[in-house]
Image (cartoon, grey):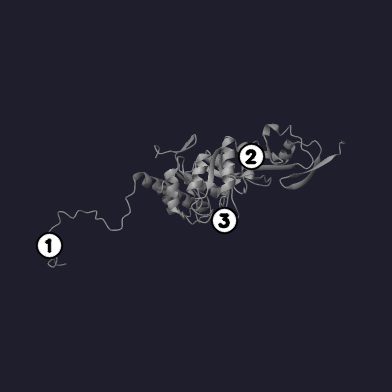
Amino acid sequence: MTAAATIRLTVNGEDRSLPGGVTLAQVVTELSAAPSGVAAAVNEAVVPRSQWDATVLADADRVEILTAVQGG
Amino acid sequence: MADDLLTIADRSFSSRLIMGTGGAPSLEVLEQALRTSGTELTTVAMRRINPAARGSVLEVLQRCGIDVLPNTAGCFTAGEAVLTARLSREALGTNWVKLEVIADERTLLPDPIELLDAAETLVDDGFVVLPYTNDDPVLARKLEDVGCAAVMPLGSPIGSGLGIRNPHNFQLIVEQANVPVVLDAGAGTASDVALAMELGCAAVMLATAVTRAQEPALMAEAMRKAVESGRLAYRAGRIPKRFHAEASSPMEGRASFDPEAPAF
């Protein structure tokens, strides 16, 4: 793998091309700096915040990043 | 009514009004309505994060000292609902969930098969599950049997404001339930809420009736008072309904007049 290798994945339904080795923590931080109130799932599995740094995303991953909004 | 707390699972509340946050024109209007309602437990939905969003419903709830109750609104399958609940637990640090699994967008009625499946899974996973359910006594019992901490039957479809369409079913559900029964969905105005409490509901959950009222904070006050009045009436024990009149003044001891004589 070269430094230029990119992966293609979806983040909240949007197609993204990101550098190989990108972590879930980096993707979440791009969308929210909030220290709480946010949760993430990769390919329909919840990834606890404590594991975001260690979670390296892969090609074709489907990432969902959610927070609380008005509802119900 | 400090001696008449609403207890669900391991938590007690002095307010029997559970609020939703959807439909409010602004966070400011929402905050005012929530404060006026006296609610201590209020729902939020889980959605994709919007980096452009300004203000947060969570900040409003924190400021008001209101417990957050995430819901699974918009989920059509047990799988979606279970994943959404697990995400809400992770995001909000609560194992409480208002479980919604709807069958279609037109009616927003619960899908009973998926609902029961999701409820069982979430209870096993350590959640305190409060399911939005049909006004079906059999389904309510089955939800209780799998370990739900309350049952939340709909009075009528979400946002319809049609009140309680089948009060008899509510009575049946209340009569058999060993967990709190909470009217969820359908309340349009204060009398709907009072009726729910008079029928023995332990609490009422509503959103639209307040957030889309002409004056949300004023309606929130009406709802708070209706919950309290209905609850008091339930505890007081209403008189039986009867076909004919029953005089409240005694017939004995009346004066004896010639019915034709008195001039007036």
Q: Earlier in the sequence, mark 3 or mark 1?
A: 3
Q: Earlier in the sequence, mark 1 or mark 2?
A: 2
Quarter holding the C terminus of chain B? bottom left
Please state if B180 lies on the left or on the right of B27 as rendered: left
Q: Which residue is mark 2?
A: B87
Q: Which residue is mark 1?
A: B257
Residue under disc 3 on the same chain as residue under disc 2: yes
**Disc 2 chain ID:** B
Residue B25's disc is none
Q: Does B61 sit above or below residue B259?
A: above
Dots 1 and 2: beta carbons under 8 Å? Answer: no
The chain that hosts pointer 3 is B
**Given the image, on which type of amino acid does mark 3 rest?**
Thr
State the SS at label 3: loop
Name the residue that disc number 3 marks.
Answer: B107
Q: Is residue A40 visible?
A: yes
